[in-house]
Image (cartoon, rainbow, N blue to C red):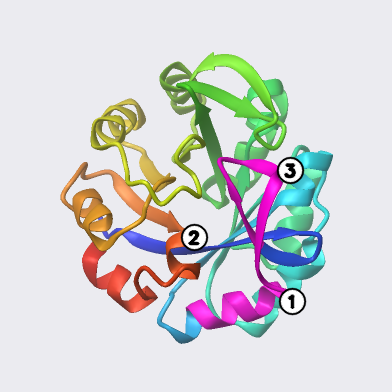
Amino acid sequence: MTIELYPAVDVLGGKAVRLVQGDYERPVTYDTEPLEAARRWVEQGAQRLHLVDLDGARDGQPVNLDQLATIAAALDVPVQYGGGVRSLQSVGAALEAGAARVVLGTIAFKSAQVLDATLDRYGARVAVSVDARDGRVATHGWLEDSGLRADQAILALRKRGVQVIVYTNVDLDGTLSGIDQREVEAVAQAVNDGELIWSGGVGSLDDLRTLAAGPPNLGGVIVGKALYERRFTVSEAIEALA
């Protein structure tokens, strides 16, 4: 399986930011216009993007669909979009705005009915995000602890037919402190014959090389702060993952 790089563009208050460990009180602004961040990654060679609506994740409904539409229209790459997508209607709205794939979070754990209906209608254009803090699934923009163990949640999602799991270690996200290789292997095992997209902790090219040499079902890696902080370039990251 080819491992794709997903440069992250996280939108909060209309700006491209990064949070540290999912803390809304600790945003770092990198670009006042998210399109500029997205354009920079594409100009460096990115073949896809990961757009996170942080306002939407906190508020419970998409807030930055206009940013999605602007980026999707301006740049000829697939955009993966998530944040506050908690209804069948909001999935449709995100796809209509230009998303190539929509990532469900909270609603996948709160309503099996909505999850099943979304999978039935949109299939492979839907992924589910499993955001883990201390090994348990965090929901509602990472602000609430669901009480579910992440590995058990992944197994349940796979049984319901979810093909793509986007896994984030919230404790490592935005820290540049490196990945937990044993966790990667454990998560990949739970995902089994589905596709895993990894996020959280990547701080060096060695982290990417470790991921590239890891589980065969790893289909993508989301990288944010390491790119913004110029730890490496998009082209270097793509080469490392190859």
Image x and y of residue 7, in percent: 48, 65
Q: Secondary structure at mark 1?
A: helix
Q: Which residues are magenta?
A: 17-41
Q: Residue at x 38, y 54 (%)?
A: 221
Q: Could you say which is closer to the camera, residue 68 or residue 30?
A: 30
- Is residue 213 in view? yes
Q: Secondary structure at mark 3?
A: helix
Q: CA distance from mark 1 to mark 3?
A: 19 Å
Q: Is residue 236 above or below residue 148?
A: below
Q: Earlier in the sequence, mark 1 or mark 3?
A: 3
**Mark sitting on residue 239:** none
Q: CA distance from mark 1 to mark 2?
A: 22 Å
Q: Is residue 178 above or below residue 162?
A: below
Q: Could you say which is closer to the camera, residue 78 or residue 206?
A: 206
In the picture, the quarter occupied by the N terminus is: bottom left
Q: Amino acid at mark 1?
A: Thr
Label 2 Cα crowd, 10 Å radius (few <14 / some 14-19 / many 20+)? many
Image x and y of residue 130, in percent: 52, 33
Query: CB of mark 2 within 8 Å of CB of mark 3?
Result: no
- Which residue is the site of mark 3? 57
Q: Amino acid at mark 3?
A: Ala
When asked about the image quadrant of residue 93, the answer is bottom right
Q: Is-magenta flag for residue 28? A: yes
- Which residue is the site of mark 1? 70
Label 3 Cα crowd, 10 Å radius (few <14 / some 14-19 / many 20+)? many
User: Depth-wise, is mark 2 or mark 3 nearer the camera?
Assistant: 2
Q: Residue at x 66, y 84 (%)?
A: 74
- Which residue is the site of mark 2? 225
